[in-house]
Image (cartoon, rainbow, N blue to C red):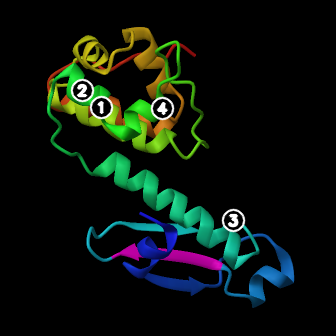
């Protein structure tokens, strides 16, 4: 979904953020709050003195919130998962996912990985097998973002699995 379509589904509030930043920050309404009406998700961005930068950050946070909060039911066969465009575009020629959290393909790929993990009762080895990657690589992928790591452990707790330990 494009940014414009996503923004049309949101209520956009701008307000003056509190905190350090001096006179400019105290006089301009640069903070942005997005309320996504269909899902009820709310995100804010108020770090920048620029309303445009804060709106862009809020949109990225809204996309991340979708991935972390909304689970889809996926057909749990390796063949079906391999054909998902967001997963196929994330895999490199060596069969690994070499994406950082800032890459636009990262969050759709993480969403699929989380959907698969949810579908196999949060068993990492089963999810990795279905995704066509190693267990260690799946753990590395989840560890690229602290919120993803936290969400994986919440999912594992829901299914009675032990939390994953961070290697750092």
Q: Which mark is residue 90?
A: 4
Nearest the camera: 98 or 92?
Answer: 92
The mark nearer the N terminus, 2 or 3, is 3
Q: Residue at position x 45%, y 61% from top?
A: 62
The span picked out in magenta is: 31-36
Q: Which mark is residue 156?
A: 2
Counting every numbered tag in the picture gives 4
C-alpha gap between disc 4 and disc 3:
30 Å
C-alpha gap between disc 3 and disc 1:
39 Å
From the top left corner, tell me how far across and down residue 101 is, in percent: 57, 39
The mark nearer the N terminus, 1 or 4, is 1
Q: Is residue 33 magenta?
A: yes
Q: Can you name the residue that lies furthest to the bottom here? A: 27
C-alpha gap between disc 2 and disc 4:
24 Å
**Is the residue 2 above or below the residue 25 in the image?**
above
Q: Which mark is residue 47?
A: 3
Q: Main secondary structure of the magenta part?
A: strand
User: Which picture quadrant has residue 22?
Assistant: bottom right
The mark nearer the N terminus, 1 or 2, is 1
C-alpha gap between disc 2 and disc 3:
33 Å
User: Which picture quadrant has residue 127?
Assistant: top left
User: Which picture quadrant has residue 121?
Assistant: top left
Discs 3/1, front: 1
Q: Which residue is mark 1?
A: 83
């Amino acid at each position: 979904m494009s940014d414009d379509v996503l923004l049309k589904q949101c209520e956009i509030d701008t307000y003056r953020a509190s905190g350090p930043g001096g006179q400019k920050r105290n006089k301009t309404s640069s903070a942005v709050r997005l309320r996504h009406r269909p899902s009820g998700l709310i995100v804010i961005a108020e770090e920048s003195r620029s309303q445009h930068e804060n709106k862009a950050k809020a949109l990225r946070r809204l996309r991340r919130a979708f991935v972390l909060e909304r689970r889809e039911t996926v057909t749990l066969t390796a063949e079906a998962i391999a054909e998902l465009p967001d997963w196929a575009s994330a895999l490199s020629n060596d069969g690994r996912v070499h994406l950082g959290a800032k890459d636009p393909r990262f969050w759709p790929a993480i969403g699929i990985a989380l959907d698969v993990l949810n579908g196999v009762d949060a068993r990492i080895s089963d999810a990795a097998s279905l995704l066509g990657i190693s267990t260690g690589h799946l753990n590395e992928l989840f560890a690229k973002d602290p919120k993803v790591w936290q969400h994986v452990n919440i999912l594992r707790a829901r299914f009675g699995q032990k939390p994953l330990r961070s290697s750092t």
